Image (tube, coloured by chain):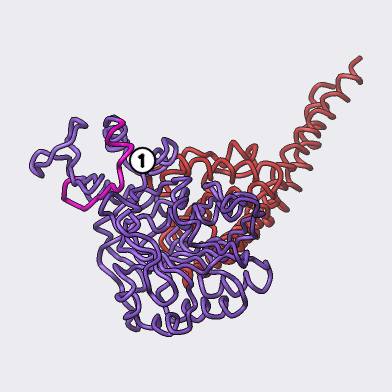
Chain colours: A red, B purple
Amino acid sequence: MKLAGAALVLIACTLIGLRMAQGYRDRPRALRQLLQAVMELQSEVEYHAAPIPEALKAVGARLEGWCGAWLMALADALGRSDEWPGRAVEGVSLASTSGGALQDGDAEPFYRLLRSIAVADRDHLQQPFLAARADLELAIQAAQDEAERGARLWQSFGALAGAFIVLLLL
Amino acid sequence: MSVARSGPSNSALAQAIDLLPRDMGLAIASLGEGVLEQLEEIRLRVGQPLELCWRQRSTFLAPDGGLTTSPDRSLRVSAGELSHVLHRLTQFSRYAVEEDMRQGFVTLPGGHRVGIAGRAVVESGRVRAFRHVTSLNIRLSRDHPGAARALLPYVYDRGSHRPLSSLVLSPPQCGKTTLVRDVARRFSYGDFAPGEAGLKVAVIDERSEIAGSVDGIPQFDLGPRVDVLDGCPKAEGMMMAIRSLSPRVVVTDEIGRVEDAEAVLEASLAGVAVVATAHAASLEAWRRRPGMEPLFDARAFDRYIVLSRRHGPGTIEAVLDAEGKPLGRGGR
């Protein structure tokens, strides 16, 4: 009985560690999806000259999962709003749509992009997109570094914490 | 003939009112049907009363929602309210309407045209943008099936079974676009002469006013045989249509540039009838415009239809042949 309990504690702690490690791995993946969204938005805006809400809807419909849903929610918010894009989209939470993989602050390069292109003419659309892509690439690199450290740490920590508790129990 | 015109449909009016700040929109929507049905323009100018134009009348919107002719007792438009309308108009995307704005207007879904005035930014002698927009004129588009009925005997030759190239001339707001839209619809449906089949029609809708397209889909009924090149420059569009869509009739709005005239000439030589409009009070005035006289000399148009507002929009003043000789009785 004691051994079974110890095994359960060990497994539970290891799983908690793996789950935490997974969280670290999800973040760069989610940021890469955001980068993909920016690149697709660029073609909608630069090539098709689609207005922002229409472009967001088109890209949102193509992208699957949380990213598509988030873009659609942004398009809806803009369609209903008469306020400046930055304020109009504040109510759309990136953190809750991405299931916690990203924080609301991670959307800032995207919002900055929307604010810039809203007042840009067609000759000056490329620069805001390049800036947003550069910001997101930096964020991805940082998230990857953090993921490597954090994921390894949590994987080991979970198993070690489990083993430590087992030793105390025994 | 004075065409008994219907006002903008409820949905068309709603699209235009939707642009406005909530209070203004509600105040206009609460005006009586008699006004709403005849409403032609909603004009907003920063610091000035909101003006409503209908049936050659000009009134202002009162703060309580009624109408007044006194500027002092009227609802004034603030810079913030105009900015609100502009954001909704451009969908937060100036780049998407840049080309239209350079020409001084933006077309709304449904074909309503919003004219823009303000501080122009000029580059190499051309308007590049408007920095401070201070006035907006929302011109309500309307459909009137049957507007072209009286014209049909003049724009189709039953002897040779061919549509005739026709140019509709008038000053602004006399119903040119409404008329050519109905001509396109009737050719498309085959509803122009007994026993005749429908014709393939290409509509070159540079300003999205003839078809009122939304996402490329016409919001006005144009019948089953119409291809619409929406937002396409007229001259280029006419050539594209002739090359690839094999139309019997090309319909377009507001020819005025030399390249438009060249495209019309090209189309007439290719055996395609062109139904077009132009701003001019008379045939003589139109011929004096740059690049238009060669069209007249080449007899590119078989018919010239002159409109006015004498008995309301759509009053046909004269129908002239290729040489400018009257065919129909004026003032109808």
Magenta segment: B33-49
Q: Is residue B61 visible?
A: yes
- The residue shown at (21%, 53%) is B45
Viewer-side residue, B187 vs A169 = B187
Q: B11 or A79, which lies in front?
A: B11
Residue visible at 85% across and 22% down in the picture = A170
Residue B179 position (above or below residue B38): below
- Does B294 appear in magenta? no
Q: Where's residue A148, x and y in %?
A: 73, 53
Please state if B120 lies on the left or on the right of B213 as rendered.
left
Q: Quadrant of residue B328?
A: bottom left
The N terminus of chain A: image quadrant: top right
**Is B39 colored magenta in this rendering?**
yes
For the question of whether residue B92 can be seen, the reply is no
Toward the top, the furthest residue is A1
Image vertical order of residue B71 relative to residue B203, above or below: above
**Who is closer to the viewer here, A128 or B274?**
B274
**x%, y% of residue B325?**
37, 73
Element carrying mark 1: helix
Relative side of A73 to A99, left or right:
left
**Foreground of the two, B66 or B270:** B270
Against B168, residue B215 (above or below) is above
Q: B260 left or right of B329?
A: right
Residue occupying the point 81% across, 36% down: A159
Q: What amino acid does circle 1 point to?
A: Ile
Query: How many badges with numbers are in the image?
Result: 1
* Residue corresponding to mark 1: B17
User: What is the chain letter for disc 1?
Assistant: B
Residue plotted at (53% across, 63% down): B251
